[in-house]
Image (tube, rainbow, N blue to C red):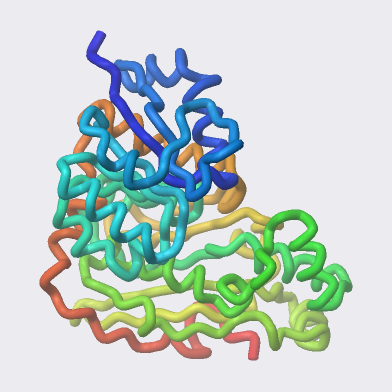
């Protein structure tokens, strides 16, 4: 058997903890999948004193200085210092696996130029969409991509459809760990816009600045709109969508839309995510699964780790690297008259 693939994790929050447990508890199964052991060499946290973990706890600088490492997993989130840590690891010749959608959306192309960057967990957690777009559908022509990319808002809208107020639905999402104390990234659509930017870059082979994607969140969705939509046979969902045409024009936005109650997207409940891809040759594809939660995200991170240990090329990272020197595409909003009409 090949020598162990030595990894370290930056961040020991919910996802980092779930990943560390999988690496220890499922070590035999992971070894079989990867064709070699994946050894957890250390975990970086800001304050390691007094904390317990299934591997040595270190400061990030100490972890990054370890020369025996083959890969770094970044699950701390945020732009900095995550960007610096990832750059340092890639420049040192290590592979990097990240779940950081904001960072990949904003800085993915230049970072991917530095070395193998893998980010399956950055969009829709357990749904295997990133490498599917970059590898499986690489020779196809994708005309549109659309989805429910935020489980928090999907749960809130479902609760409101059941009669809860926005405030009560948000409070319940917080109690269940779906919403942060500051929910603005979710309810103001920043989170799904970043994810849509990543998907659009992979689908259309164009560089996308996530700040250019129009975002309309769910704060202003009211009971009257929900009831009016229900009477007309619609369900309100926060839809992230992007399309392109033969001329290369790109239209994209994130906004609440009226989805027919009998459409597959209308039946995506709770914290689930769904992504619909319209490809010229593969046809219409629908991916659905858990889009949030530590175990789902850790599953996607682990898939990238196994690919790295098996020396499978980082197809999505390589694709982003080709976009590094390109100017961001001009992105026009889809507006209210897309496949599903705007809710307001």
Placement of 51 over or under 245, stated as above or below: above
- Asked whether 206 or 166 is in front, the reply is 166
Horizontal relation, residue 127 to residue 281: left or right:
right
Left or right: 318 in relation to 80: left
Foreground residue among 208 and 116: 116
Q: Position of residue 150 (x, y in %)?
A: 57, 64
Residue 250: x and y, percent?
30, 80
- The residue located at (82%, 81%) in the rendering is 227
Front residue of 74/214: it is 74
Residue 77 in the image: state x and y as whole percent: 46, 58
Left or right: 320, with 154 as reference point: left
Report which quarter residue 189 is drawn in. Answer: bottom right
The residue depicted at 27 percent of the width and 50 percent of the height is 137
Q: Quadrant of the C terminus?
A: bottom right
Residue 10 to residue 77: above or below: above
For this orientation, the residue located farthest to the right is: 163
Q: Is residue 326 left or right of residue 82?
A: left
Give the quarter of the image for residue 105.
bottom left
Across and down, in percent, residue 23 comes to 47, 26
Q: Residue at x 14, y 57 (%)?
A: 113
Residue drawn at (40%, 79%) of the image: 252
User: Is 304 situated above or below 278?
Assistant: above
Which image quarter holds the N terminus?
top left
């Amino acid at each position: 058997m090949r020598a162990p693939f030595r990894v370290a994790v930056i961040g020991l929050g919910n996802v980092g903890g779930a990943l560390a447990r999988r690496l220890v508890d499922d070590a035999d199964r992971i070894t079989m999948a990867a064709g070699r052991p994946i050894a957890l060499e250390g975990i970086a946290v800001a304050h390691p004193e007094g904390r317990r973990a299934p591997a040595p706890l270190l400061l990030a600088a100490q972890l990054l200085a370890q020369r025996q490492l083959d890969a770094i997993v970044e699950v701390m989130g945020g732009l900095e210092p995550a960007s610096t840590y990832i750059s340092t690891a890639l420049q040192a010749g290590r592979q990097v696996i990240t779940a950081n959608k904001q960072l990949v959306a904003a800085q993915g192309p230049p970072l991917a130029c530095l070395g193998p960057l893998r980010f399956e967990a950055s969009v829709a957690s357990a749904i295997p969409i990133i490498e599917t777009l970059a590898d499986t559908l690489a020779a196809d022509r994708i005309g549109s991509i659309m989805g429910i990319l935020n489980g928090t808002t999907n749960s809130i809208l479902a609760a409101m459809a059941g009669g809860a107020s926005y405030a009560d639905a948000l409070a319940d999402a917080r109690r269940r760990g779906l919403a942060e104390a500051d929910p603005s990234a979710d309810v103001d659509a920043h989170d799904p816009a970043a994810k849509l930017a990543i998907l659009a870059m992979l689908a259309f082979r164009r560089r996308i600045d996530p700040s250019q994607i129009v975002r309309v969140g769910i704060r202003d969705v009211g009971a009257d709109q929900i009831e009016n939509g229900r009477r007309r046979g619609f369900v309100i969902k926060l839809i992230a969508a992007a399309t392109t045409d033969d001329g290369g024009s790109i239209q994209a936005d994130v906004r609440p839309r009226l989805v027919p109650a009998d459409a597959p997207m209308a039946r995506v409940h709770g914290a689930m995510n769904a992504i619909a891809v319209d490809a010229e040759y593969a046809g219409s594809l629908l991916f659905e699964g858990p889009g949030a939660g530590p175990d789902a995200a850790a599953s996607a991170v682990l898939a990238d780790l196994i690919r790295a240990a098996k020396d499978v090329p980082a197809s999505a990272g390589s694709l982003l690297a080709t976009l590094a020197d390109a100017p961001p595409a001009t992105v026009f909003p889809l507006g209210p008259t897309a496949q599903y009409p705007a809710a307001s």
